[in-house]
Image (cartoon, rainbow, N blue to C red):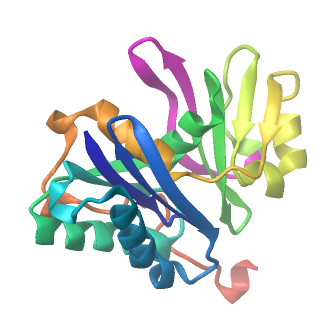
Amino acid sequence: MRVLAFDTSTEYLSVALRVAGDTLSRDVKAAQQHSDWLLDFVHELLAEAGLALNQLDCIAFGQGPGTFTGLRIACGVAQGLAFGADLPVAPVCTLLALAAGSRADRVITCLDARMGELYHAAFLKAEAGWQTLVGPNLCAPEASPSVEGGHWTGVGSGFSVHHEALARRYAGQLVRVDGTMFPHAADIAALAEAQGPAAWIDPEQAAPFYLRDKVALKTSER
């Protein structure tokens, strides 16, 4: 299977090409310049693999949650490329991609959502694949949903920005924390491949997954 994937949901840009189980990738801390790098990375990886876009099986992208602009970029580029090459797309949850990238079996994922909040979810890896124990949600760090038991791994920028509040919230339950992790396209590609063609959709059906309906606080809310 041949899957192109990318994620622009955070300050990082990640692009990957998965071919027969092997993965080529590029990533960079792009700040707000994702659109300047994204297509260049796509062309580089296709050239390195000796493939044309229409030889792929699917285009996968980080659907969200994440930054508003970043999610629109990923979705728009995925749709444009897929329409041009007559390919399906595979939207993949960025929080699930974080969990997959942790290489752990019990994972709490937290991305910094700014305005004192987190994009949060919790996942369990089973033989049949990933199970969602706490679905993607927007919350304050101190009010993040509880999980049962111990041996949890915490990943994502939320654990860096709000480490004290999350350490208190999950005291005694976390065995490892990595606040530097971001959703990576290599994991998005692998998840899309695992979903299989039955779960892929037509490009016109693709849409970002937002958890928040505003991007900034009013002056009175600050």
Q: Which residues are magenta?
A: 122-141
- Percent across and percent down for residue 58 are 23, 51
Which corner quadrant holds the C terminus? bottom right
In-front residue for pair 105/136:
105
Q: Main secondary structure of the magenta part?
A: strand
Residue 148 colored in magenta in the image? no
- Decide if residue 56 is on the left or right side of residue 140: left
For residue 221, say whether it is visible: yes
- Residue at 81 percent across and 53 percent down: it is 160
Out of 105 and 13, give the one closest to the viewer.
Answer: 13
Q: Is residue 45 above or below residue 122?
A: below
Across and down, in percent, residue 106 comes to: 63, 22
The quadrant of the picture occupied by the N terminus is: top left
Residue at position x 38%, y 76% from top?
Answer: 39
> What x and y, as percent, mark residue 193?
31, 37
Q: To which quarter of the image does residue 74 belong?
A: bottom left
In-image side of 4 versus 148 (left or right): left
